[in-house]
Amino acid sequence: MPTSENDSPPVYREIAEDLRAAIASGELSHGDRVPGENDLMKRYRVARATARQALSVLINEGIVVAIRGSGVYVRTFRPLRRHGPRRLSRELWSTGRAIWQADAADRGFETDSIEIGNVAAPEHISRALGLPAAAPVLRRCRRYRLDGRPMQLATSYLPADLAAGTAIGEADTGPGGIYARLAELGQAPAHFTEEIRVRMPTPTEVDRLHLSAGTPVLDVLRTALTAAHSAVEVNEMTLDGSAYILQYDFDA
Amino acid sequence: MPTSENDSPPVYREIAEDLRAAIASGELSHGDRVPGENDLMKRYRVARATARQALSVLINEGIVVAIRGSGVYVRTFRPLRRHGPRRLSRELWSTGRAIWQADAADRGFETDSIEIGNVAAPEHISRALGLPAAAPVLRRCRRYRLDGRPMQLATSYLPADLAAGTAIGEADTGPGGIYARLAELGQAPAHFTEEIRVRMPTPTEVDRLHLSAGTPVLDVLRTALTAAHSAVEVNEMTLDGSAYILQYDFDA
């Protein structure tokens, strides 16, 4: 029972489809200039409004970016493969490496802003950590950059009494980061849950992540649990959706 | 080193932030009417253009939906939790249940369109399945609905010689679906890889998934591998991003 959708699409969609195919095939690749309104008007014998509409479709899809006064270009960024299970394996943080080093082995990944302090836990955080309402938690807000471009906001919460007096409350958490410090406290993470949602960014996120039009964000909410299934950290991450491929491997 | 972003935001952003907070707190919940332009003009003493801009921010974020001639409403759909590892566990399909039954136990999940046929494998598919270029593959294209609403497009590819003469090529693949049939052939999936990307939809996808403005899609590319790590199926899925929460659990 194939569906029938045989109405012929409007011309601007056909033009957009041609350009999309040229990008998918690699004929136009990252950073290439896409034919402009004048080129499209000549090539397809259409009005300027039609050419503009075709380009708008691709801009709104986020596969090309308009640069004012210059033209329209195929997106230039190589996405980062974020491998869920492998990047959080114990071998990694127990040998003193930062988790994000697994994502971006040979690329310039860095924290460019960090704010640390104790706060009263927001409701969903106290619930996730199994704490009383508004219990004190240590909050760490960071922004990460890759190749100089901001691409992730992350806010971790840990029970304040667990973190007190450890490097977990410092800007530099030491070799292996938070998880290695938790292990030293006998609270090593053994299980993780990641929940992924996708949505359009708020204006504040557009600013902080320098997002161009047509770029959704990924919300990744990670809970780290000990072997005894007690939650020791919740990390709320917001990722530039154009910058990431998330990968998860698991068994049947 | 906290970042300083102290410029006071434009009024329309503040109004949008108020409405967003009302939705986040549950004061306005799914299906509620959001204050209209006239309400906002009175309440905030702003011009119509400012009120409209505030509502546009939320519409573009996809957290409210404008219904022509009626008003603007908080999104009414309860997202579907799609639990990666659990839904693909062998216990599930080996006992004759369909995989999507794990997602939507008590809800009306159904296939409403299916197209099946042999094709020459597209390049990325022959590569993923370890087949020669343009090798014959069985392709199954489906659309899924939940509560009457289309929410997922899925196209599976399997080596044509593997599927030949089995129910894998039928509209009804029988109890436990494709994976149970593969198991009967001694080719049971043992490992899965899922790759997740996010992007704005193409116009065709907007039509087929009935997407409203500000709704991104999730691309999930799943490869099913046997215990001997031979790829037996690749499934390219496109999910309505507003309809899903993806969950993955794994160990450190």
Image: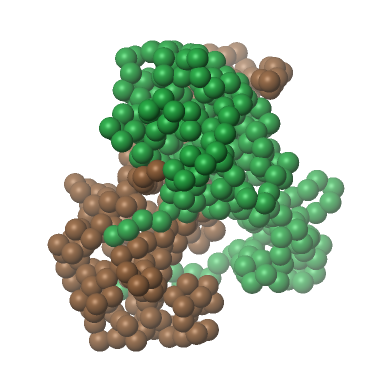
Chain colours: A brown, B green
Above or below — where is A18 with respect to B231? above
In the foreground, A84 or B75? A84
Above or below — where is A195 with respect to A245? below
Q: Residue at x 41, y 69 (%)?
A: A234
Above or below — where is A212 with respect to B44? above
Question: In the shown orientation, is residue A43 left or right of residue B110?
Answer: left
| Quadrant containing the C terminus of chain B in the rendered view | bottom left
| Quadrant containing the N terminus of chain B in the rendered view | bottom left
In the foreground, B190 or A31? B190
Q: Is residue B211 visible?
A: no
Question: In the shown orientation, is residue B19 left or right of residue B166?
Answer: right
Residue B140's image quarter?
top right
The image position of residue B40, as x and y in percent, is 76, 66
Q: Residue at x 34, y 14 (%)?
A: B133
Residue B117's image quarter?
top right
Q: Residue at x 25, y 49 (%)?
A: A104
Q: Is residue A89 visible?
A: yes
The image position of residue B42, as x and y in percent, is 80, 69
In the foreground, B86 or A169? B86
In the foreground, A206 or B77? B77
Question: In the shown orientation, is residue B56 left or right of residue A213?
Answer: right
The image position of residue B67, as x and y in percent, is 78, 48
Residue B4's image quarter?
bottom left
Q: Residue at x 53, y 49 (%)?
A: B82
